[in-house]
Image: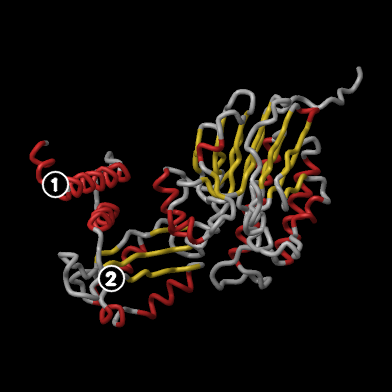
Amino acid sequence: MPVRTSIPTVLRLVHLSDLHLGFRQYQRLTPAGVNQRETDVAATFRTAIDRVIELAPDIVLVAGDIFHSVRPTNQAILHAFLQFSRLVRELPNAIVVLVAGNHDTPRSTETGGILPLLAQLGMNVVDRKAERLSFPERDLSILAIPDVPGLEVPSLKPDSAAQYNVLVFHGEVAGILPAWASVADRASIVINREDLGARWDYIALGHYHVYTEVAPNAYYSGSIDLTSVNTWGEAHEQDKAGVHGKGFVERNLETGEHTFHVFTPNRPLVDLEPVRARGLTADELDAKIKGIVEACDGGIDDKIVRLVAFDVSRHIARELDHKTIRDYKRRALHFHLDLRRPDVFRIHASGAAGGPRVDLKDVVAEKLRWRTIDADIDRTQLIDRAVTYLDEASAVALAPAALVDAS
């Protein structure tokens, strides 16, 4: 019987992004002297490659920020080379496309990046300019757009000659990212959502670290680990979106079947129950903190842990049991006791100069975020409804009297 040598028509792709290999955080080192979080992220990437090989897709798209910096550590370069080598070896017929993100791209065109090294493995690396990659044996066209300052974005039109058209883009889709994420880690390329179009079979986005649907055919796969500048903000955005972890997308281009594959994190992130310290003595607050820490499921050892305490005055903060707090920091990979001072509110905007001006919507949202509510109530919808009512009340208060009377 003759051996079949033709490559089957493209059906499935895997889309992952924001690997951030070489990411470092906190001061804890491994016995080998490597930053522990860098090691964690490397282990997560190895897990991701394991899962991709198991799925054996026809296409693997990496939508940018392969490395955390333009000059990654030697360990990060070696790990990337070894893992991508394994991917190419185990999936010899897969099309692999890597697109540069803002963290991969040198600010100067005279400075070379590290990604061309990975092209030696036989992968398609797009790191300087947008490219349309054609794979006629698969009836496939991929438009790849890296995040390069000053890049002229090409027309976002599919190739009419190909059956399957995929767009892979690292950058910001306007209006999708929360304000803190957009400011803290700016993309060079920003595209409006309406410019993406519905004619693409799939749009693989990179840059935002939370798995997000932008359109039925367009998704941010999110990062594979917690690697943003605001870890807790990232975790909060995941909770708000109902996303329960990090992972990657699997997409069937023929049927549109879509799966988000979630990883078990290498390093647990624990946000402990917050404390309201108003009226408590230092000893009472110490006891509250101790009770919450001891009640942590599985303990705090080797985890990334935060405990927020509201309404803690300076003198109470000074009198806390700092020896015990240092012990928590020794046990956890990172223990952050976030002591927040009492808010000082001004009743009227015309009050005394120097006092902080507090938006009532922010106050209400914060109160509802931590208030105990019934389990069957959706907290996000409750906060959104409260903020909407306040907006409506403000509109009525600011309206001309005649309009109010007329209503």
Helix or strand or loop: what does disc 1 sit on? Answer: loop
In the rendered view, how is the structure colored? secondary structure
Q: Give the vertical position of 154 relative to 18 (above or below).
A: above
Of the two numbered discs 1 and 2 on the same chain, state the one appearing first in sequence.
2
Q: Position of residue 214 (x, y in %)?
A: 50, 39
Location of the N terminus by quadrant is top right
Name the residue furthest right.
2
Mark 1 crowd level (few <14, some 14–19, many ≥20, 10 Å Cα): few
Mark 2 crowd level (few <14, some 14–19, many ≥20, 10 Å Cα): some
To which quarter of the image does residue 339 belong?
Answer: bottom left
Helix or strand or loop: what does disc 2 sit on? Answer: helix
Q: Give the vertical position of 66 relative to 287 (above or below).
A: above
Amino acid type, label 1: Pro
Q: Which residue is mark 1?
A: 400
Badges 1 and 2: C-beta atoms under 8 Å apart?
A: no
Q: Residue at x 64, y 33 (%)?
A: 157
Q: Position of residue 223 (x, y in %)?
A: 57, 51
Res. 128 in view: yes
Which of these two is toward me, 276 or 19?
19
Res. 43 in view: no
Which of these two is toward me, 167 or 336?
167
Which of these two is toward me, 280 or 78?
78
Spatial CA span between label 1 and label 2: 54 Å
**187 relative to 367 in the view: left or right:** right
Location of the C terminus by quadrant is top left
Q: Which residue is mark 2?
A: 287
Amino acid type, label 2: Ala
Total numbered labels: 2
Which of these two is toward me, 133 or 85?
133
Q: Residue at x 24, y 51 (%)?
A: 372
To which quarter of the image does residue 287 belong?
Answer: bottom left
